[in-house]
Every structure is written in structure tokens, then in C-alpha cells.
Amino acid sequence: MRGTVLVAGMGLIGGSLAKAIKAAHPQAEIIGYDIREDEVGLAEALNIIDKKAESFQQGAEQADLIVLAVPVLQTEKLINELAEFTLKEEVIITDTGSTKKRIMSCAAILEDRQITFIGGHPMAGSHKSGVAAAKELLFENAFYLLTPGEGANEKQIAVLKKWLQGTKAKIIEISADDHDRLTGVVSHFPHVIAASLVHQARKYNNSNSLISRLAAGGFRDLTRIASSNPEMWKDISLHNKDVLLTLLHDWKIEMERVIEVLEEESEPLLFDYFNEAKEFRDDLPAKAMGAIPSFYDLYVDVPDYPGVISEVTAYLAEERISITNIRIMETREDVYGVLVISFQNERDRKRAQQCIEKQTNYDLFLA
Ligand SMILES: NC(=O)C1=CN([C@@H]2O[C@H](COP(=O)(O)OP(=O)(O)OC[C@H]3O[C@@H](n4cnc5c(N)ncnc54)[C@H](O)[C@@H]3O)[C@@H](O)[C@H]2O)C=CC1
Ligand SMILES: O=C(O)C(=O)Cc1ccc(O)cc1
């Protein structure tokens, strides 16, 4: 499609969307805006955008599509500013925020002015922030939830979907209420719990520092999302406060029940507690992408010599395979060390496996 797209917020998500939109619509002009000059400057230097907006207003007033990819409290601020601008009549405004109810209420101010707002939430990402981590295919196969405002018609929704087709995401429509309830359960609440598990380990670590050594590996993997951007999760928690409070309340009741069952030493009830969780979890789709990024780990048995990590990463870099995480696992006694490399998707892991097999004779295995 032709037209001008303004992406406000040149971070991980704004940068990735700008890339995906450009890939599918090379004729479109992508303008970037960010309060951080360095981020928008980097986006321009990396050719993620065609040019910087002189100001939010100047960029917005010439745009056919406006994407707000800023932290959710800032999204509300930008929506209020947009309501004061002289925008193109046919402009479509969308956002990428992780919460939708408060954003949609705020966007009512645009609908009052006959401006189309369609809420959006691409449900993929990473614990990294900033435009340097942006990827064209960040959202490939991920759910992309749209919450159209009451004023949005089918034609406008279809136009937005077309703009977004380069994301290769599974775009579905949902109400803002359902969005916040569902993402509350499978994304926002787990982030609170992951942080709480880490806090608990940190407290016990004060009296026995062996804790942090034992927390390597499994515990670290389990709490990976606690390394996400604290600023972003502060805003998401405030926006989805009611849902989170309900979930925390239910969780408290459930924990009280676990305490009772343990105090009673009830073997059948304890068994049921773990078994019912296991059965439900075992039935969850393993390959599909959900609300929280999956692990795509490759384990490489590496010999113990200096530079082995840079050797392996250099092979991957040569074939432009990007990695999301790397660590050494030293818990197995029969090997010197296992290098655990994480990838964003199955395709990258497969390519990495083939690449390392071609270049080395190290044993490789998947989790
Ligand atoms: N990081 C993730 O995994 C995901 C994040 N989201 C949502 O997408 C949005 C953006 O998140 P990220 O790209 O991860 O954050 P980020 O921190 O990488 O980028 C946000 C950018 O917005 C800029 N910014 C902040 N306030 C601004 C304002 N008033 N005007 C212009 N620019 C402003 C910041 O300078 C920064 O460059 C958030 O609302 C978040 O909830 C949605 C899906 C996944
Ligand atoms: O890396 C993380 O912490 C994630 O869980 C990624 C993520 C963050 C925010 C979203 O709205 C959707 C996905």
C-alpha cells in the first residue's frame, strides 16, 4: 500500500512494526517519532524508518496510519494530544499497548471527533527494549489482538489488517474487556508471580548465599520474565489493576488451601493438586505461540577451552542467525560444560543446529 505511516515510540515494538510494515509495503513512507532523539536517530541510521518526524504533531498530521508504540501510560497522553491535531480525515490510529480497556476508554475522545481508533496488541516480544533489538519477523505466527473502537467499521479494520500483513501474525478481534481479562491471566499475572518468586529467593539468599547458585538453571529459566522492563510492567500493572487484584485475591485463597492441605499432610489432596496442574499443562499446545515467548533452546556440549563461546557465536553470526540468550550450564558431571543458546523461533534453532553441526563435531541436543 502507498501512504504515510507514523510510528510513535521507536523501541522494540515500534521498530519491529516499522520493519514489518516496510517489508510488506515498500512504497509506503515510514516516519518515526520518539521522545528519545538517540532511539529515533538509530532507527533512521538502521533504515528502519525513512525519516524522523519534526514533531509528533507534524508527523501525525501527514499520516494515513498512526501507530502508538509507547508505554501504556504514555499512550493515553499521546491519544489526548492527537485529539487536538488536524489529522487526515481517513487516518487510522492504532496502538501496541499490552492493555486495552483504559486505552479504549481514553480513545473515545478520538471517536467523538470521528477519528478511527483500533486498539492493537501484538503478542510477541522479549525482555529486551529499544530499537536495536527490533526484528521484522518478531510477530511471525504470534497472536495480534485487535480491539476496534465502536466507531471503527469493517472496511477500516480490513485496511489496518492489510497494513499489518507483513507481521505474519494471526490477527484476531476481541473486546477490550476480554483482552484485559485473558492477558491478565496468561501474561500480566505470571509477571507478578515471577517477580515474587525472585523476591522470595533474594530474601532467603540473604541468610544463605548458596541459594543464588542453586537458582541457576531451572529456577532462572522459570523466572525469566522477571527480567522484563520494570517501567513497562509498572504501567501494565496499573492499567490492569482490577483484573490483577482479582487474580491475586484468588491466588491468595488457593495458597491458603495449599497451606491447609500441607498442614493436614493430605497425600491424596497434594497428589491431586500437582496432578491436575500437570494434566492441564500437558494438554497446552506446545508448538503454538502464546502470550509469553517460548524457549527455543539448543544445548551444545562444548570442550573446556577459552574462547569456545565466541567460536560458536561467530559461526552463528556468519550465517546471520540471531540469538536471544546464551549461558553455560555446568550441572552435568560427564561433560565439561553445556552451552545453552536460546533462539526466538524454531526456524532459527533449526538453522543454528545445522550450522553448528556443519562447523564442529560438538554434540547437540534439544530440551
Ligand atoms: N516488549 C514487549 O515484549 C511488548 C510490548 N508491548 C507494548 O508495546 C509498547 C512499547 O513497548 P516496547 O517497544 O517494548 O518498549 P521500548 O521501551 O522498547 O520502547 C518504547 C519507546 O517509546 C518511547 N517513548 C516513551 N514515551 C514516549 C512519548 N510520550 N512519546 C514518544 N515516544 C515515547 C521511548 O523513548 C522508547 O523508545 C508498550 O505499550 C508495551 O506494553 C506489546 C507487546 C510486547
Ligand atoms: O518477554 C516478556 O516478558 C514477555 O512476556 C513478552 C511480552 C510482553 C508484553 C506483552 O504485552 C506481550 C509479550
Image (cartoon, helix red, strand yellow):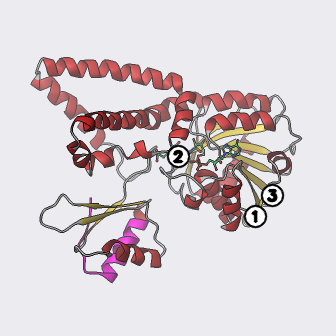
Q: On screen, 186 above or below 260? A: below
Which picture quadrant has residue 361?
bottom left
Whether 68 is among the magenta residues is no
Upstream in sequence: badge 1 or badge 2 = 1
Q: On screen, 164 above or below 173? A: below
Which of discs 1 and 3 lies nearer the camera? The answer is 1
Mark 3: secondary structure:
loop
Whether 366 is among the magenta residues is yes
Q: Mark 3 points at which residue?
A: 3
Foreground: 82 or 101?
82
Within-10-Å neighbours for mark 1: few <14, some 14–19, many 20+ = some
Q: Bounds of the magenta span?
A: 348-367
Magenta stretch mostly in which secondary structure?
helix
Mark 2: secondary structure:
loop
Q: Which residue is drawn at 50% across and 29% down?
A: 181
State the mark number for residue 50.
Answer: 1
Q: Is residue 87 left or right of residue 188?
A: right
What is the CA distance from the residue labelled 2 to the residue labelled 3?
Answer: 26 Å
Q: In this view, does 205 lie to the left or right of 344?
A: left
Quarter of the image that includes the C terminus:
bottom left
Q: Residue at x 76, y 49 (%)?
A: 65
State the mark number for residue 77.
Answer: none
Q: Mark 2 points at which residue?
A: 123
Which picture quadrant has residue 83?
top right
Upstream in sequence: badge 2 or badge 3 = 3
- Picture coordinates of residue 124, whole percent (x, y): 51, 49
Which picture quadrant has residue 359?
bottom left
Amino acid tagged 1: Asp
